[in-house]
Amino acid sequence: MPADAVLPRLWLLAPLAESLASGWLMNGRRFRVDPGRGSLARSGNEPQATFERIGAALGARLCELYDLVDRNWAGFVRSAGLADTSPETGPATFWRRLADLFAVDFGDPIASHLHGPERGFGRLVGECPVLPTGLPRPFQLFLRARDAKHVATGALEDGAILADLHDWPAFDDIADNMVSRGAALRLSALGFAAPSALTLAALVKRELSVDNRITPERAGRIGRVLKRERVNRLPWGEQQEVLDAISKGRFLMADQSWREARLPARAAADASDEERLILAFAPGGAIADPEYAGPALALYRLARERSGFQQTAATYAAWALSVGEPEKQAAVLRYVLEGTQGQVLGDALADARPAWLPARSDELRTSPLVAGIAPDDLPALLGRLYPEEQRQRWAVDFVDENGDQEELRSSDRRVDPTTFLERLHDWWEREASAERVRSDRNAYPEGFDPGRLTGQSGNSDRDGWFTFFALGIFRTIGRSDDTQHRNFIAVADRAGWWSDMASARLPDGPEPWIRQLENFARADAWHIDFPQWRRALVDLYVVARWLPDYVDAVLTLPAIVRKQGPIALSDAWRLSTSPLWQRRGLEGAPLTQSLGLGANWLVREAVRHGIWTGEDIAAMHPYGWASTARLRALFSRHLGIDLGPEAKMDLSRDIHARVEAHIGDRACFLGDLDLPLQIVAHGRRDDVLQSLLEGPTSFDLDTNTPVDGYED
């Protein structure tokens, strides 16, 4: 152990007035001192020359010491009185502590001259394998200076990662010649050439060898090291190098070809709902061999993130043209109906129809290919595959909340609003249970239950609340549906960055957000999955930045409504400027535009899943009605109720008042608010809508007459 810090380091019978940063005491008659004999002489090359001469003698004696320790450890231990007498661990302990003792000299302008390639500790490690590498087994624990070829840098400085390299073939090339950064710094201080830096990315490239083929076995070895959470924690530059290295790898496909990472194996345990839909009709050349599982599959997925594989509707359409098996043809149709890119694929198949797809919708309706599709879903499928036939049934255009044109039915059939809404309520009483399950399954990622947010603050369940708000914000994305929102979150969660973004402490710790923005801006990005959802990152950042305040607003809003009466929902989401929150002191960037009609969806879902209770639920009923383009069209064309040309979150109270005027307290639709209306207006339940429209049509309604005194 180092000498007591208060003791002088240099002595010439008596202590010299010198302050050396050294760990040991030196008493020598060779010291040249000044005339007063109180300190070292300083002239010419002194005192450096004296210390170099002493260092030369020290180096020789240290080499003799090595021979003694190596030859007679037991005798040395007895004479030196060392604590660790074990022949297995004692020598290693001794050489490490001796290295630490001399390392203190390296930073001192005088004591450092004791050591160099031919002096002191430098001569010892130059001739004897006693330089502590600072690395764990199975690496060499001690080396000669000349054998240190590489220094572990970046991620390789993590001992856990190094320990996982034991079964890599590339490990054999470095196990006997690599040192830690600390050991490399000591070598440089001693005057030896610095070892070359070795990064995790460079090691991965060595492991992949020339052919870049990553067999399932090799993928398992690499995957145990390149765990997603580890890669996500890497500094940005090193992370990109690692991902670039594995993305260039070639994997074994189900058809035994070697290709860049594409889709997982058909039976992949972690496949998302979207992937399962695609895997059901994808060709063997786009699907991984089933041996990729566990760590091997995890690595495959990492490589897929930037492999360049074009997972687009155009790719799926090309596959569909060559599909021969009826079960795969049926799977294509299933994807058109339920897939994230189903609408786009349907358009592509309508333009370039495969030979196996009937020319007319009536033929497909009776084909065995749709035997597995529920009758309620069939109209939506036919609408996507046979748009020209469907277009004959549409005439009036409405502009939806995202600026998109919505084509709506040209039928002039009008029904009594009371009759329609009563029939809708009767249908909902019969079908609510099944429809609720279907709605929640489509809307929420697997394992997410908004009911668990009851009583939770924005700090106690950041992941849950962040997801809930995100689903609301995604409703401003045009030409999208619930399953696409859910699938995006599922992909992000599986990639590990959804939770990272939700839990980031902003604005001080924005690194998870910056990483995603950098990924989005990569120059080598061939294709960005879910581009519209990724562009919503700015809105999501705002949510994460002020999440506790936004959650407080959600939980407190019913009390505000009960106390103050009707409010403008758009005003409630301007936390910093709205008088509603002045006494509560809430702060946050405005969410009115970011949420759009998603604000009404949040209210509806909070009511449906019990986030509010008791009187709070009833107070919020008027605010859970979204004025979507299809709902406005339904009201205008068939009920004679004009809700205006634009979607606004503040139209919710108007819609609720009109529905309540016709069916009274049944307007809450068993606590589901506008859900049944949105279902029948969306078009997926065309059969239900048609049955609801049957009945008396002799009503000539004045669409500008206020309902029950409530005016637009």
Image (spheres, rainbow, N blue to C red):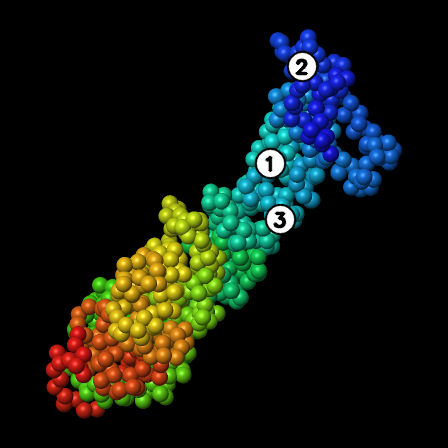
Q: How many marks?
A: 3
- The reply to whether residue 471 is in sight is no
Residue 528 in the image: state x and y as whole percent: 37, 54
Residue linked to disc 2 = 40
Instruction: Tell which circle, 2 or 3, labels the residue nearer the N-terminal end.
Output: 2
Whether residue 517 sits left or right of residue 25 in the image: it is left
Nearer to us of marks 2 and 3 is 2
Amino acid type, residue under disc 1 in the picture: Arg
Q: Nearer the viewer, residue 381 or 624?
A: 624
Residue 340 in the image: state x and y as whole percent: 37, 66
Q: Are marks 2 and 3 in contact (CB under 8 Å)?
A: no
Instruction: Tell which circle, 1 or 3, labels the residue nearer the N-terminal end.
Output: 3
Determine crowd level at label 1: few under 14, some 14-19, many 20+ residues with C-alpha closer than 10 A: many
Amino acid type, residue under disc 2 in the picture: Leu
Residue linked to disc 3 = 160
- The reply to whether residue 5 is in sight is yes
Residue linked to disc 1 = 181
Looking at the rendered structure, the secondary structure element under dot 2 is: loop
Nearer to us of marks 2 and 1 is 2
Determine crowd level at label 2: few under 14, some 14-19, many 20+ residues with C-alpha closer than 10 A: some
> Marks 2/1: CA distance?
35 Å
Looking at the rendered structure, the secondary structure element under dot 1 is: helix
Determine crowd level at label 3: few under 14, some 14-19, many 20+ residues with C-alpha closer than 10 A: few
